[in-house]
Image (cartoon, rainbow, N blue to C red):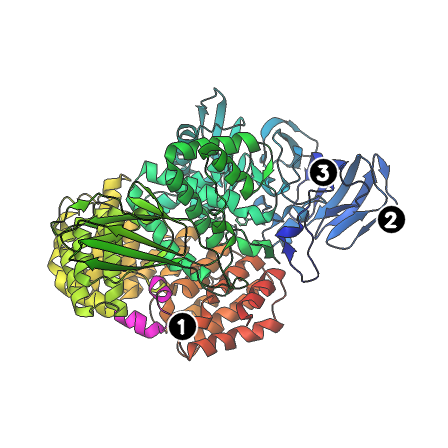
Amino acid sequence: MSVPREDGFVHLADYTPPAWRVVHADLAFDLDPDATDVSARLELQPDPAQPGAPLVLDGEALTLLAISLDGQPLDASRYRHDGRQLHLHGVTDACVLETRVRIHPAGNTRLEGLYTSCDLLLTQCEPEGFRRITFFIDQPDVMPRWRIVLRAPRDAYPVLLANGNPVGTRALGGGRHEAIWENPHPTPAYLFAIAAGALERVTRTVTTMEGREVELNVWAEPADVPRCGYALGAVERSLRWDEQRFGRAYDLDVFNVVAAQYFTMGAMENKGLNIFNARYVLADQATATDADFMGIESVVAHEYLHNWSGNRVTLRDWFQLSLKEGLTVFRDSEFSADLHSRALKRIEAVRVLRGRQFAEDGGALAHPVRPDRYREISNFYTLTIYEKGAEVVRLLHTLLGEKVFRAGMDRYFADNDGRAATLEDFLAAHAGASGRDLAQFARWYSQAGTPELRITEAFDAAAGEYTLTVDQHLPPTPGQPDKQPLLIPLQLALYDASGAAINAPPACDAAVGEGRVELVARRHVLRWTGLAAKPLAAFNHGFAAPVKIVFDYAASDLARLAQLERDPFLRWDLLQQLATGALLRTLDPHAAAGALSDALADLLTDEAADPAFVAECLALPDFDTLAESVPVVDVDALIGAREALLDRLTEDQVEHLQARYEALADAAGDGLSGEAMGARALRNACLAWLTRLDPTAALAQAQFDGARGMTERLGALRCLVHFDAPGAEPALQAFRTAFADDPLVTDKWLGLVATRPHPETRDAIYALLRSPWWNPTNPNRVRAVLGAFARSNPLGFHRRDGGGYQLVAEQIAVLDAINPPVAARLLAAFEGWRRLAQPLRTRSREALAPLEGRLVSPDCRDLLQRLLAP
Ligand code: BES
Ligand code: ZN
């Protein structure tokens, strides 16, 4: 257990095992949105190594109705409840604690603990929500087995779900009924869940590789059930993939997924009862885009895969969060790569890393993949824990190779099954399986900041000698001024003047593997001899290392390498580098734009090129990625340069874009094949470029009117709205009306309006906040309007007068009282404020400073302090 120190922080170094364990938990719920009574019977055992340690349970927002110990009601002098914890005096031996508490789900706008979502009753317990349901030792290393009884009126709550296996149901008097569930696996409270309501389902039964029959169910409110089939298929694909790739079988008789309209996060991996944000469950082609379908499949996989990486092997403490999240993101990304295109999955991940995670790692909120202290753990569900954490697992996979990595994973699962583990346990399993010393590698977990590899080349023509000098630079981050060198596998390739790959490995003092060197020191010199001419070097194939490479290329080198490289990721990346160089003028802008234009022409006219890949190449580095590449962010200048380059490229390519758009019309028809999705992606990309040159937006209007599904419809509507086309308002109106009763589709058009790239969008947001569509208690709605504005509308959010910041700051203060984690996420949009060029730096500080006196939640207060810390 860890208690905060006087500085208000919980420290990793303070961890001690729990002084008391809950070995069995028996819960009974009398469900009612206005007053739910929870009876808990906990079998408690003291840790023999900590005799006499006081018995303290967590409990917040609970009304205590009854309490007894070993069957005897407890006198008020025997315990104390201070609103956060329940202290039991003089208890030293194993005992049974029984409590009855009352809670108020309908008033729970935090959506943590037991809450209402439309007519459903649902729970969300990670990380510390269970203490809002009943008194408990609410930390992940306390893992009882569970029995859960749910009672409710049958008409309002015909379906009663909980963790584990169903044991039985029976009718009670007065129109009430009861369901009993048992979860036989030791499970921490953060994985507890119940769901109750008028749910209906799609279902199928599968047999696992161990021969267990498992009923897979996806539950939703009745009107939504026709849109659950895709998610159900994704559950089955996930189950099969974990068997085949990791040898992991499912371990209960049922696997339930429930779709919720009110849900703060994307989805939650509760044991046997995953609860999902409806946007990651419900889909058909009329209402969901291709990106939605792909998102559903990968979120389903992520939560399913947690059953082993998170649930069977859980966390010792919250500092280990990346042990489940980073590992599971790695696993779900491998799932998507195996089922679809590995290269496209990698490109997608690298966009998020470069645009968002690198920014986090270089901003006010930077922290290591394993933080060493926190005030509020809910503020650490970050891109660093998730995405960088997944990259670190990928590094291990690269270093060890698939076979040894798999052996390490088998060992990790075998050694830690049923336990609460640490990142050391994870590394120990891989060290054991591989025989490698991973001590230096472990620094990836403890050091924050994105490493930079500064590479310089030299060629001695007389000697035929080519050298690359690689310097590892680790920037200082809050609390970590000095850093130790990391173990970095660097993939590289050299090409000679004819374009042939030079296969000879370099002479150097670093270990050399297949096409890579393993950097361990601050500097390495790599040397090749016997070369007739200076070769061309290419780095970081597949983005194997999550680092920034600094190397002085000429535009013509990048273009040539983009032709020579066989690694599709790197080909994409080289074109991104050309674009970045043109935009930031680190390359001769004319030469870079010309080379990029030629490369795009080749791609657009190459019938053999995968349309989805071409679409990725047309998507130039976004604002976040550009902002991340400069020391001081001049928002208007960056966006102005980007728009100018897009205009120029479109003028060059207009005929090719039109031809490609036309040629793919049939292939884009319908269906969810990779081919159809790729065709739609490229057509939408072409459409966005072509609309720049056409003030009437006739093509976009035609696509909107004739759309064969949501991908085409929304792609066209985005063009109409973002380019201020004459048809924008009528199209929006038609779209609004057609989907008026669908909250997920409503979020889509709200998102388009909120991201219209114009300073005036600020006023459109104020109008939305006064409209009937606004609902600050629904996190999806908040994200669609305010999240999209703050994160994806730089021209609006960073208005020169600070009006975008003011708007968002005001709303953060409102949301702080409704749903603190949602408010805190919005506040994190200010993480880069210190790097803004004036006057925006001052404007953002002026918007943040008054929040100091207004924000009350620990979540927001923690974040604000870190944002403003000198
Ligand atoms: N365990 C998390 C959900 C969660 C996050 C609960 C934060 C409480 C606080 C879940 O496994 C998860 O990571 N969900 C992601 C989506 C996933 C595909 C990365 C999410 O909710 O964003
Ligand atoms: Zn997760």
Q: Nearer the viewer, mark 3 or mark 2?
A: 3
Residue 32 appears at what percent x and percent y?
66, 44
631 left or right of 770 in image: left
Q: Label 1 is placed on what type of residue?
A: His
Q: Label 2 is placed on what type of residue?
A: Ala
* Front residue of 61 and 425: 425
Quarter containing the C terminus: bottom right
Of pointers 2 and 1, the one earlier in the residue sequence: 2
Instruction: Mark yes or no: residue 826 visible.
Output: yes
Question: Real-space Cα distance between discs 2 and 1?
Answer: 56 Å
Question: Real-space Cα distance between discs 3 and 1?
Answer: 51 Å
- Helix, strand or loop for disc 3: strand
Residue 340 appears at what percent x and percent y?
31, 39
Instruction: Mark yes or no: residue 688 visible.
Output: no
Q: Is residue 305 above or below residue 615?
A: above
Rendered image quadrant of residue 594:
bottom left
Q: Label 3 is placed on what type of residue?
A: Arg
Q: Is there CB contact under 8 Å for labels 2 and 1?
A: no
- Helix, strand or loop for disc 2: helix
Q: Which residues are magenta?
A: 625-641
Give the number of the disc on residue 76.
Answer: 2
Which residue shows up at 35% across the image and 68% down it? Answer: 630
